[in-house]
Amino acid sequence: MQKLAMERLAQIERAERHIESLQREQKDLDDEHELKKEKEIESLLKSNNEQRTSTVHVLQGLLDSERAEHADANNWADSLSLQLEAAQVKLDSLQQELTSVRLNETALDSKLKTASHGKCSRVDDYEMGMDSVQDMEMSDRIGDEDTRSQQTNSEDNRKFTVTKIKQELTKYNFGARVLDMRTGASKREWLELYESRMLQKS
């Protein structure tokens, strides 16, 4: 009986050791499976992060490009707006100057016409009071004096500046001829115009 009991005890111990061995193997398999599963999950997460990062970079690049194009368009629009404003201000200034010149010319023409009319009336009254003999004597004197006066005036005229010539022409109702003169005309051309108009007026 004791021998049989000892054999059964030995069998029980072997069975227990076998069970422990199987349990260790099971645990090793479980650990290995868990480790493999963790590696797979880590690999999937890494891949997903890489794809997400790449997508973010692409989207960020597109956004930056769109912002840059939008900024360039705004800058171009602002530049055009400033150019248009400057051109409009210059145009308004030129129109005001032109209006001022025309108003001044009209006022001068009106004054010169009034003065010319009064002068002509006084000359007519004076001539009507002169007799024929005095007219002939005065005509001879005036002819000589006019010749000398024209020579003296011609010399005096050459002392005029271009601005002075313009003022004199405008004064004697030749403002239109001043405006018709070409830009950059020489002083000699202005003198020729002045002398020809003064002779025509006389």
Image (spheres, grey):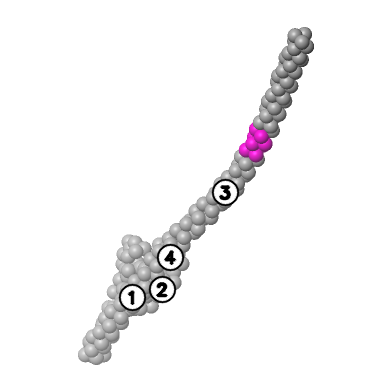
Secondary structure found at label 4: helix
Residue type for callout 3: Leu
Secondary structure found at label 3: helix
Question: Separation of disc 1 and disc 4 at Cα?
Answer: 22 Å
Residue type for callout 2: Arg
Question: Separation of disc 3 and disc 2 at Cα?
Answer: 65 Å
Expressed as whole percent of the image width and height from the top left, the position of residue 127 reads 25, 88
Q: Which residues are magenta?
A: 41-49
Expressed as whole percent of the image width and height from the top left, the position of residue 75 reads 50, 53
Image quadrant containing the C terminus? bottom left
Asked which quadrant contains residue 54, the reply is: top right
Expressed as whole percent of the image width and height from the top left, the position of residue 163 reads 34, 64
- Which sits earlier in the primary sequence, circle 1 or circle 3? 3
Contact, CB < 8 Å: mark 3 with mark 2? no
Overall secondary structure of the magenta section: helix
Residue 177 is labelled as: 2
- Residue 57 sits above or below residue 82 on the image: above
In the rendered image, residue 43 lying in the magenta stretch gets the answer: yes
Question: Separation of disc 1 and disc 3 at Cα?
Answer: 60 Å
In percent of the image, x 69 and y 32: which residue is there?
37
Expressed as whole percent of the image width and height from the top left, the position of residue 78 reads 47, 57
Q: Determine which residue is flagged by label 1.
A: 103
- Select label 3 or label 2 by which is in front: 3
Q: Determine which residue is flagged by label 4.
A: 88
In the rendered image, residue 46 lying in the magenta stretch gets the answer: yes
